Amino acid sequence: MSSRSAHVSVVVPTFNESRNVAELTRRLGEALLGFEWEVIFVDDNSPDGTYDVVKALAVENPRVRCIRRVNRRGLSGACIEGILSSAAPYVAVMDADLQHDETILPEMFGRLERDEADIVVGSRLVEGGSSEAGFSAGRAFASSFAIRLASFMIGAKVSDLMSGFFAMKRERFETIAPNLTTSGFKILLDILATASPPLRASEVGYKFRTRFAGESKFDLRAMSDFFGLLVHKVSRGLIPPRFVMFALVGGTGVFVHLISLRLCLGLAGIAFVWAQTLATVVAMTWNFFINNMLTYSNAKLHGGRAFLGLLQFYAVCGIGAIPNIGVANWLFGMNNSWWLAALAGIIIGTVWNYTMSSLFVWRRAD
Ligand code: GDD
Ligand code: MN
């Protein structure tokens, strides 16, 4: 134990990780022997009382600190606050569940100290790295697809852009922090896409392990969130991340519409106009519930409010059909290209639906 201030700081976001934090702290002590280190757990008021366990560890070990956040959720936001609470020149972020290999931390910090890089990423995808153990096949595929797409879009020279395991110079982080988003799992992508001048990045491979205890919080929402941020950054802030999500949900609605239409037409003696009407209602209902779950998850409507919201959503989309058809018709009259006209109509309609839904249906979404 020492009275010197920390030289390296490890920030660990936690949500229901009470059974992992003691083991992680013990392993950090072994891995960082010889460093002036500290670990900062940032816990979002976990129902399993992770913060209590961390505070008990802190009583024994002054290298351990705990930030307990109340009424807030978000992996990225937790990392940001943890890093900003530190005064150490070098900071790392890692999972609490022991999936990230703490033994590469000295190498990561070493590269920063020798000024070989501004950010060092623990990677499952470079030489020496792997993720067979920790991931299901579906998850591995989705992850590698998202990473490829993201590297292509932001031109980053990091192979594991979804990694939640990295170390960087705190000074560089401090300057970009105000421009980062606080929700979801995409902090590394966000940091790399936001930093200007770009960060010099380097990677250290490691074997992604299976979770020690507890369960993963990574879900469909975390994934779509990642995609939304990507488009937001590539469009230089023009397209809001939530709009991307809304439009994607709209895309799935088209399929739902077509399938329902086909099924309705199979019903004996139904007129096309009724089948089309029914399919439209089914698709709008689908869009409403998926948006309620994913796009506006932070302003989710329940029970009677959800029912009212559904009716409002029907109204918004119904009115949205007017600018949609109006613009399409106007463009078609000008240049006779049916698909261009339809596309413009769909875009205008989607922008309308999104704007009005955000204003009236999910009013509490920030
Ligand atoms: N404070 C806080 N708030 N912590 C959170 C929250 C939250 O809302 N959500 C998750 N965490 C913590 C978890 O407790 C864990 O320590 C860490 O963030 C990562 O969450 P996991 O639930 O373990 O994610 P994963 O292992 O499935 O996801 C892995 O792959 C992602 C991308 O492929 C991790 O390596 C992630 O870091 C990575 O981004
Ligand atoms: Mn994990």
Image (spheres, helix red, strand yellow):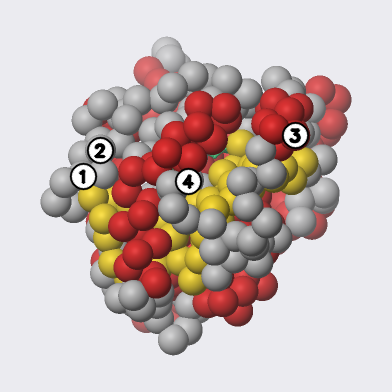
Disc number for residue 211: none
Q: Which residue is drawn at 81% across and 23% down?
A: 303
The kind of residue tagged 1 is Gly
Distance from disc 1 to disc 2, alpha carbons, whole Å, reads 5 Å
Distance from disc 3 to disc 4, alpha carbons, whole Å, reads 22 Å
Disc number for residue 207: 2
Q: Which residue is drawn at 54% across and 53% down?
A: 37
Assign the C terminus to one quadrant of the image.
bottom right
Q: Which badge, 1 or 4, comes first in the chain's sequence? A: 4
Residue at the front extreme of this rendering: 2
Is the residue under label 2 in contact with that under label 1 (CB below 8 Å)?
yes
The kind of residue tagged 2 is Lys
The kind of residue tagged 4 is Met
Q: Does residue 307 appear in the picture of this structure?
A: no
Give the vertical position of 266 relative to 276 (above or below).
above
Cβ at disc 4 under 8 Å from ligand 1: yes
| Residue that mark 1 sits on | 129
Residue 264, percent from left and from top: 45, 22
Residue 344, percent from left and from top: 47, 69
Residue 342, percent from left and from top: 43, 63
Residue 27, percent from left and from top: 45, 34
Q: Which residue is drawn at 53% across and 39% down?
A: 221
**Element type where label 1 sits in the image:** loop
Distance from disc 4 to disc 2, alpha carbons, whole Å, reads 14 Å
Q: Which badge, 3 or 4, comes first in the chain's sequence? A: 3
Q: Which of the two residues, 66 or 295, is positioned nearer the viewer here? A: 66
Q: Which badge, 3 or 1, comes first in the chain's sequence? A: 3
| Residue that mark 4 sits on | 94
Q: Name the side, left or right, on which 309 lies relative to 112.
A: right
Is the residue under label 3 in contact with that under label 2 (CB below 8 Å)?
no
